[in-house]
Image (cartoon, coloured by chain):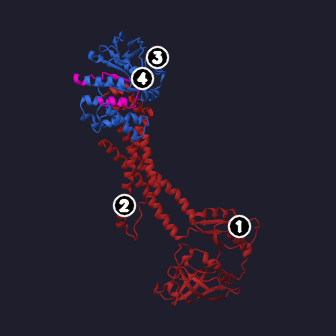
């Protein structure tokens, strides 16, 4: 192989590798952020709310709500019927509770869910277990329940984090809630709760809440407000819909939206971030593409030189019976090979570079299990190979046509 | 048949009206001084340059009307060329040079090699088939180029000064080989030469001068 051809291939190698490495850095950023996000909030859980305007109407205590969707038990049943839905639970919240642990007071909120479907929901306990369907007074603690809430004890000494949520498993804790009655007197109600487990971090409200059965939370709410809840007319404020896997999230979302509810899912955030990252990748790939453009000019130059050098050879071939397309294809194949070989070597080099980038970044940033700054997807490799071959092919077209159209007699006479 | 060339703004009449029939199996010498138009005539005959006016018929093919691509296909099937300067491809071995013509005809690799070997046998160069042109003498290179012209079994072989670069002994060898091929394979040869010695091997000698046929001698 000629030195000139090797230099040209090196040009393609640099071009291909710069595109791959650039895009892989965009990929890496996307991957680490989406991994982070999907780690926090379960991607397969949708939060369903009543349409905000209808909630406003009912909260003001009037208005016809016939044409508004109400998130009541009938709606819960309808949500359950959607294809791909595994579990649906209403969510009833209670705030203003206090518990005393190891003589310290902690303000807590309860998040009531349907224990009948608790097994099917994507809640994972780090220790202990989930309560059964009939354990109405059993609860799971969010992982930050004891640490992150306002310290309300009388003592000025801080003895926080002495007790971990895990230490309370199997124990009964006593929660107190207060209300002010019609005569302006304060009343106190106590409720015993049995802790069965601690929830893995979800990144949502659960981390700061105690998960309880929604029947219990509804009872406590009614005592606190002194009103019977009218679920049938007013609906629940929120429901959680657990779906089979992330592939059905979008379908289920649109079906729920068709029922005139507001849906919020991690998938929506990931989707909107996806387009931002696509822009980033096009930008980075474009910067890398400049190197490949230069390589492309190199191929055109090499092929043109090669044709000048081989004019006589082309003439001989035409005289002994090579057709125009034979000659053209021969040169196009040659330049495509330059692109393809350059692309292959470029891919190997960028795979090595990617590993090195992550290793070096790991040394500076630290962190367990390595760092992903650069991430090369199989699709990117296939694209790069295809693209480099295409660049080679296109660069060869003009020189090849020039070669094919040489007059055989003039060509054979040239020296 | 006429052929003009543009030289600057002037039209140069190289061939000024040639009318010639060549029979199958003939061995024709085109003899004349340089500038007489004999090489141009051969090139027009091989379809390498189109005539300015007039027709060239080879069997039933009117090659003066063919497109460049049709001419390529026609040459591949019916014509063989031998040049004064051999015109072998320097990066290829003798065998590869001979087989190249078959490559364009789409012949399979094993058959290509077999036929190239047969052609080299005819010219007596089988033992040299792995050599590059630079490793062969002038006479051997010319024999490779004859093998290349033969390998397609064309009806007509056009030779432009085939012995022009060779000494007299080698020239005689080459001409004897051509004569033998002409007799055994019944191929038609048209040989351009300015060497009267060459003409004694031919069945017909055409004397050209100033773009015209001066005399046509059967012998």
Looking at the image, residue A32 sits to the left or right of residue A6; the answer is right
Image quadrant assignment for residue A236: bottom right
Contact? badges 1 and 3 (CB < 8 Å): no
State the mark number for residue A54. 1
- List the residue tagged with mark 3: B55
Give the position of the N terminus of chain A as an image quadrant: top left
Q: Closer to the camera, A248 or B98? A: B98
Contact? badges 1 and 4 (CB < 8 Å): no
Does residue B69 belong to the magenta stretch?
Answer: no
Contact? badges 4 and 3 (CB < 8 Å): no
* Disc 3: CA contacts within 10 A as few (<14), some (14-19) or many (>=20): some
Q: Position of residue A189 (x, y in %)?
A: 64, 88
Q: Closer to the camera, B126 or A273? A: B126
**Mark nearer the viewer, 2 or 3:** 3
* Disc 1: CA contacts within 10 A as few (<14), some (14-19) or many (>=20): some
Give the position of the C terminus of chain A as an image quadrant: top left
- List the residue tagged with mark 2: A357
SS at mark 3 in the image? loop
Look at the image and give the residue range highlighted in magenta: B143-170
Report in which chain the residue with disc 4 lies: B
Q: Position of residue B42 (x, y in %)?
A: 37, 19
Image quadrant assignment for residue B212: top left
Q: Position of residue B203 (x, y in %)?
A: 35, 16
User: In terms of sequence position, does the residue under pointer 4 or pointer 3 come before the other?
Assistant: 4
- List the residue tagged with mark 4: B47
Report in which chain the residue with disc 1 lies: A
Chain shaded blue: B
Q: CA distance from mark 2 to mark 1?
A: 53 Å
* Disc 2: CA contacts within 10 A as few (<14), some (14-19) or many (>=20): many
């Amino acid at each position: 192989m000629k030195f000139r051809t090797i230099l040209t291939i090196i040009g393609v190698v640099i071009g291909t590798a710069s595109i791959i490495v650039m895009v892989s850095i965009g990929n890496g950023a996307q991957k680490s952020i989406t991994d982070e996000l999907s780690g926090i909030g379960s991607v397969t859980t949708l939060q369903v709310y009543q349409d905000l305007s209808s909630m406003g109407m009912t909260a003001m205590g009037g208005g016809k709500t016939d044409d508004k969707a109400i998130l009541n038990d009938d709606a819960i049943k309808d949500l359950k019927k959607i294809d791909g839905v595994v579990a649906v639970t209403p969510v009833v919240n209670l705030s203003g509770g206090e518990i005393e642990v190891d003589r310290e007071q902690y303000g807590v909120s309860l998040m009531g869910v349907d224990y009948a479907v608790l097994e099917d929901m994507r809640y994972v306990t780090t220790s202990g277990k989930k309560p059964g369907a009939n354990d109405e007074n059993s609860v799971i603690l969010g992982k930050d329940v004891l640490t992150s809430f306002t310290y309300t004890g009388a003592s000025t000494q801080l003895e926080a984090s002495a007790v971990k949520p895990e230490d309370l498993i199997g124990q009964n804790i006593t929660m107190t809630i207060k209300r002010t009655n019609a005569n302006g007197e304060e009343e106190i109600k106590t409720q015993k709760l049995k802790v069965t487990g601690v929830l893995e971090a979800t990144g949502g409200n659960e981390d700061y809440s105690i998960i309880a059965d929604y029947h219990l939370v509804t009872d406590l709410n009614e005592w606190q407000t002194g009103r019977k809840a009218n679920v049938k007319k007013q609906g629940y404020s929120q429901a959680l819909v657990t779906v089979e896997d992330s592939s059905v999230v979008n379908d289920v979302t649109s079906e729920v939206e068709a029922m005139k509810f507001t849906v919020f899912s991690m998938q929506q955030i990931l989707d909107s971030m996806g387009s931002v990252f696509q822009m980033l990748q096009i930008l980075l790939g474009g910067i890398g593409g400049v190197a490949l453009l230069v390589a492309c000019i190199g191929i055109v130059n090499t092929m043109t030189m090669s044709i000048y050098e081989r004019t006589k050879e082309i003439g001989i071939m035409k005289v002994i019976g090579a057709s125009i397309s034979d000659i053209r294809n021969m040169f196009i194949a040659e330049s495509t090979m330059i692109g393809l070989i350059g692309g292959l070597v470029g891919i190997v080099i960028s795979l090595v570079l990617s590993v090195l980038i992550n290793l070096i970044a790991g040394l500076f940033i630290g962190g367990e299990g390595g760092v992903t700054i650069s991430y090369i997807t199989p699709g990117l490799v296939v694209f790069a190979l295809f693209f480099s071959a295409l660049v080679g092919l296109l660069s060869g077209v003009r020189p090849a046509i020039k070669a094919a159209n040489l007059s055989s007699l003039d060509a054979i006479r040239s020296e | 048949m006429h052929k003009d060339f543009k030289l600057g703004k002037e039209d140069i009449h190289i061939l000024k009206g040639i009318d010639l029939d060549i029979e199958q199996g003939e061995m024709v010498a085109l003899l004349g001084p340089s500038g007489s138009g004999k090489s141009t005539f051969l090139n027009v005959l091989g379809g390498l340059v189109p005539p300015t006016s007039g027709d060239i018929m080879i069997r039933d093919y009117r090659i003066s009307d063919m497109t460049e691509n049709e001419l390529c296909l026609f040459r591949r099937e019916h014509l063989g060329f031998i040049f004064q300067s051999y015109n072998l491809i320097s990066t290829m071995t003798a065998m590869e040079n001979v087989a190249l013509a078959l490559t364009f005809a789409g012949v399979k690799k094993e058959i290509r090699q077999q036929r190239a070997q047969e052609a080299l046998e005819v010219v007596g160069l089988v033992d040299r088939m792995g050599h590059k042109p630079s490793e062969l003498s002038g006479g051997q290179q010319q024999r490779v180029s004859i093998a290349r012209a033969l390998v397609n079994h064309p009806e007509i072989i056009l030779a432009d000064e085939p012995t022009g670069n060779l000494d007299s002994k080698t020239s005689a060898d080459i001409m004897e080989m051509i004569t033998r091929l002409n007799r055994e394979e019944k191929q038609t040869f048209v040989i351009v030469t300015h060497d009267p010695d060459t003409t004694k091997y031919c069945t017909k000698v055409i004397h050209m001068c100033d773009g015209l046929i001066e005399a046509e001698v059967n012998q």
